[in-house]
Amino acid sequence: MSCRLPVGAPGLCAACWSAITFLDGPGCTCCGLPFPVELEGENSCAACLARPPAFDTARAILVYDEKSRGAILALKHADRLDLVPGFTRWLERAGRAGLADCDLIVPVPLHRWRLWQRRYNQSAELARRLAASRALAVDPFALVRSRSTPSQGAMPSAKARRRNVQRAFKVPDPARVRGKRILLLDDVLTTGATVDACARALKRAGATRVHVLALARVVKASDVLI
C-alpha cells in the first residue's frame, strides 16, 4: 500500500508491515493510550482520570503515524474497500475483550452529506465485515450524526474537538440500543472526542456498556492528519 508494491491482504508488503507500530503493550485501562513502561495493576491515563469518558473501554490496533497513514487514508478516501478483510482480521484480534462483551456493533456514522460525497462509510464497512465474521448483530443506522461538523482534523485542540461534536450524534430509535452492550467501531482515535460523544448518545438512549474499537490511534499530536 505505502510503497505501491503488489501485495495481498491486508495491503502491506513486508517492509511496510515491519515499519508499523502495533499497540500490544501496556496502556490505559480505559482508553488504551500506550504507556512507555509496564505498571502494576490496572491504571488509567491522566486524561481519563481528569475527565472520565462516557465509553467503558477503547482499544486500537496500531499507532496512527506516517507509516500507517497511507493505508488508512486509502480505505477512508480512495475506495480501497479491498483492505476491509485484512483490517477486519486485525480488529478481531485487538478487540477480543470488547467483542466478547457486546450484543451489537454500531459504526461511527458520517453526516448524510459527507456520506453522499464519499459514497460509503469506512467504519460501517468494517462493522459489517466484523459482525459477519463473529456472528454478531450490526446496526449502521442505530446512531446518526444529526448535524454536519467541520473535520476533527482541523480542530486546534482537544477542547475544540469536544465542542465541535457536542450533541452532534443522536439515536433516532432508542429501542434499538436499549439494554444493549455496544461495540462502537471507528477508523482513527485522536483525542477520543468523537467516540465519547457517540457513547454519550448511546448511553442516553439506554445502552448499558459501550466499548470502542478502532484501527488506529494518534499517540503524538503531530500525527493528526486525517
Image (cartoon, rainbow, N blue to C red):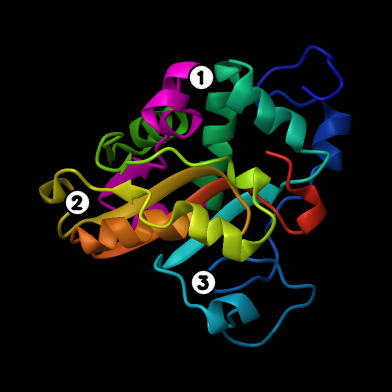
Query: Is residue 139 one of those drawn in magenta?
Result: no
Residue of label 3: 30
Amino acid type, mark 2: Val
Q: CA distance from mark 3 to mark 1?
A: 32 Å
In this view, 65 is above or below 119: below
Q: CA distance from mark 1 to mark 2?
A: 27 Å
Residue 124 relative to residue 156: left or right: left
Q: Position of residue 96 (x, y in %)?
A: 46, 54
Amino acid type, mark 3: Cys
User: Which label belongs to residue 177?
Assistant: 2
Name the quadrant of the C terminus.
top right
User: Which label belongs to residue 85?
Assistant: none
Amino acid type, mark 1: Arg
Q: CA distance from mark 3 to mark 2?
A: 22 Å
Residue of label 1: 118
The magenta segment is: 95-124
Mark 3 or 1, which is nearer the eye? 1
Is residue 114 or residue 100 the one in the foreground? 114
Of the residues under marks 3 and 2, which one precedes in the sequence? 3
Residue 184 relative to residue 215: left or right: left
Query: Badge 1 local density, few (<14 within 10 Å), some, or many (20+)?
Result: some
Of the residues under marks 3 and 1, which one precedes in the sequence? 3
